[in-house]
Image: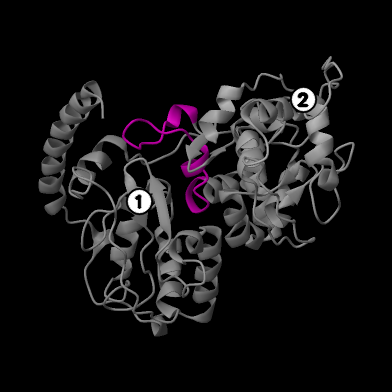
Amino acid sequence: MRAKTRKRWGIVLVVVILLGIGAAVVLSGLLDPRYETGAADGPEAADRQMLDRGKYLAQAGDCMACHTAQDGPLYAGGVPIETPFGTIYGTNITPDKQYGIGQWTSADFYRALHDGLAPEHPLYPAMPYTTYRGMSREDSDALYAYLRSVPPIAVPNKPTEVPFPFNMRFLMRGWNLLFLKDELPDVSKGESQQWLRGRYLTNALGHCTECHTPRGAFGQLDLGASFEGGTLGDLNSPDITPEGLARRGWTPEHLQRFLALGISPLGSAYGDMYEAFHFSTRHLSKDDNQAMVAYLTGDEPLPPLALPAPADQQEAPQAGLTTGRSIYLAVCAGCHAMNGEGKPGATVALKGNSTLRNADAHNLVHVILHGLEARSLPEGDRQAMPGFAGELDDEQIARLANHLRTRWGGQKGDVQPGDVGALR
C-alpha cells in the first residue's frame, strides 16, 4: 500500500473509531420498542399463510444466493463474498441454535436487517442491510418465521478473511453513522401503485442498488450515482437507470421477459445476474415482475434508442487472423452464426446484444478472455462459451471486440490491446 494511501486510511481509521465509540455509547442506551427482547419464536407461532409469504420474500430478497453454498445445505451459509477489504462468507441462517439464528428473536432479526446489528456483533455491509433497511417489520417477521421453519443445519460459520484494521467489527458502528441512510434516492419518476410496489421490490427486497451502484473508498454506496453501474467481482454491473436501459435498447417488455426467463432479444443473464435470476427474479409473481420493471423504467418509459447502422470498419484484407471479422469467422461463427444471429436455445444473437451496446467494453473483453459457464434457462440451456485467452493475443482480442462492438453494438471500436492485457 502506498504511503499516501496508508496515511489516508490511518486518518479515517481514527475518525471511524471515535465515531464507533460514540455510537456504541448511544446505541447501548436505546430503548426502542421495535427491539423488544424475549425468547425466540418457534415455527408453530406462524400460520401457513405467513410461512408461504416468508418463503416468497426469501426468494424476492435473493437470500439463497449468499446463504446457500454450491451443493451445500439450504441456508447453511459458506458462500464466499469477495470485497476490496477481504473475503466475507455468507452465514448460517437456519434455526440451528449453535451456528444459525435459532437463538434469535424476531426483533433480533429485524435489527440485523434494519441496522446491521446481529446479537453477537455488528455485520459487514456485504450483508445488504443498507437496502434491507427499507423492509417493513411485517415482512421481516414473515421472513423470520419462514427461516425458522426450515431444517436446522449444524454447519459452523466460516471466519471472515478480513485483515486488520477492518476485522475490528465495532468500527462498523461508526461506518453506519456515516453511511447508513433511511431512504434511497429514486431512480425513476412515478406515482402509480405499481411504481410504488416496484420501488419497494427493487430498493428494499431485491437490493438491486447493491450491485448496480458504484461505491466509494470505504465501501459505501455512491447514492448520487444510483443504478448507474457498479464494480463487484470480475464483471461490471451495467447502468440500469431509465436512461441507461433505453440507451442499450431495453423496453419494459424485454425487461419483464429477462427477469422471468433469464433471456430476451438483448441477451441472456450471466455472471452474478444469472444467480439473481435463478434464485430470485424468476420466482416473482407476474404483478411483482411488472411492478419492478415499472420502477426501473418509470411510469412513462423512455423509448429505446435505435441501434445505429453498422460502422464501415475499412479493414484491409490480410492473411490469417489479423482482422476482427476474420477472427470472428474463425472462432465465433461456429456458435453465433456467420451473421451473428445465434442459435435458438443454445447461443444468443449478437445484433443489438446489450453487452455489445454497452459503452464500457469491460464485460465483453472479460467474456472473450475467460468464457462463460453453461447455464440452464426455462426456454433451453445456454451452452458454455470457451475462453480464448490461450488462443488469441491481446491485439487479436482487441480487434475481435471492436468488430463486435461496431458491427452489432453501435459502439466505437476503441478497445486497445492494453485494455485486454489488464483483464487477462
Residue at image coords 75%, 61%: 381
Task: Give the spatial CA distance, label 1 vs label 2.
Answer: 41 Å
| Numbered range of the magenta stretch | 203-225
The picture places residue 88, in percent across and down from the top left corner, at 34, 54
Say whether residue 95 is left or right of residue 235.
Answer: left
Label 1 crowd (10 A; few <14 / some 14-19 / many >=20) = some
Q: Is residue 70 left or right of residue 344?
A: left
**Which residue is labeled 1 in the image?**
87
Q: Name the N-terminal-most of marks 1 and 2.
A: 1
Q: Residue at x 67, y 33 (%)?
A: 245
Q: Which residue is mark 2?
A: 322
- Queried whether the magenta region covers residue 216, the answer comes back as yes
Residue 326's tag is none
* Three-letter amino acid code of the residue under disc 1: Thr
**In the image, residue 336 above or below residue 314:** below
Q: Residue at x 36, y 40 (%)?
A: 84
Left/right of residue 105 with respect to residue 390 in the rendered view = left
The percent coordinates of residue 239 (x first, y second) are 59, 33
Badge 2 marks a residue whose secondary structure is loop
* Residue at the far front in the pictured view: 319
Q: Amino acid at mark 2?
A: Thr
Give residue 339's quadrant in the image: top right
Residue for point 73% across, 30% down: 400
**Which color mode does the image show?**
one colour
| Residue 377 highlighted magenta (yes or no) | no
Q: Foreground residue, 143 or 225? A: 225
Picture quadrant of residue 294? top right
Q: Quadrant of the N terminus?
A: top left
